[in-house]
Image (cartoon, grey):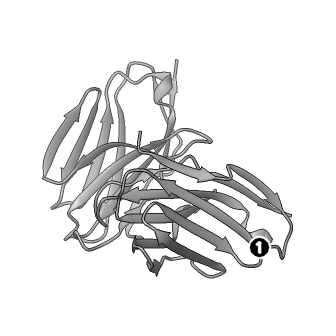
Amino acid sequence: QKEVEQNSGPLSVPEGAIASLNCTYSDRGSQSFFWYRQYSGKSPELIMFIYSNGDKEDGRFTAQLNKASQYVSLLIRDSQPSDSATYLCAVAKTSYDKVIFGPGTSLSVIP
Amino acid sequence: DAGITQSPRHKVTETGTPVTLRCHQTENHRYMYWYRQDPGHGLRLIHYSYGVKDTDKGEVSDGYSVSRSKTEDFLLTLESATSSQTSVYFCAISESLSQPQHFGDGTRLSIL
């Protein structure tokens, strides 16, 4: 089992819909969770991080963490074509461990 | 944006030649990383550094070496480049090991 798993996609959603991206991780003791966005041909860009169970909102983005079920999700409300990108989930077990990146999910927002 | 500069941005070279990629930061972050990104493999850690002259291997370190003589500079060297090292290379920095990483713009390396 890989340490961080994501559906590769592509995930297609219509403009204005909610896009839901999911990530599961194998180590129950993981403490830090990050979402990155990567446009084609560009570098990953941090968009959200979450450390505690529950939801964290930032504009149109909401990160949801459920440590008991070992998943973290990213919701994008009112999806725009400019949200079309690959979204990388990253997890760190403890403050002494490296961040592990998932393979990414490709999102396409259809006008 | 985090002050991270990678050079060169593009390079084409031949098999067997040495190649050095440079990462320069202006953020004074302790940790610096080198990743490669290939289709179907995602981001894979090559080496990372936790201070001047302090480095450690990542999951795909074979064929690569690194050096960090100053806080702001982290060099990645391919001693004898092979076609399998054709990839996009990203440098990243972070304040601590588990903190968010910020990435440079990448170097597209082609080895013919």
Q: Which residue is mark 1?
A: B18
Residue at image position (24%, 59%) is A32
Circle 1 chain: B
Q: Is residue B90 left or right of residue A31?
A: right
Residue at image position (83%, 76%) is B16
Amino acid under label 1? Answer: Pro
What x and y, as percent, mark residue A70?
23, 61
Q: Quadrant of the N terminus of chain A?
A: bottom left
Is the residue A25 above or below the residue B25 in the image? Answer: below
Does dot 1 land on a helix, a strand or a loop? Answer: loop
What x and y, as percent, mark residue B3?
44, 45
Q: Nearer the viewer, residue B38 or B58?
A: B58
Is the residue A78 above or below the residue B76 in the image? Answer: above
Q: Quadrant of residue A5?
A: bottom left
What x and y, as percent, mark residue B12?
81, 57
Q: Is residue A53 left or right of residue A33?
A: left
Is the residue B112 above or below the residue B100 in the image? Answer: below
Q: Nearer the viewer, residue B75 or A107?
A: B75
Residue at image position (20%, 60%) is A69
Is the residue A29 above or below the residue B5 in the image? Answer: below
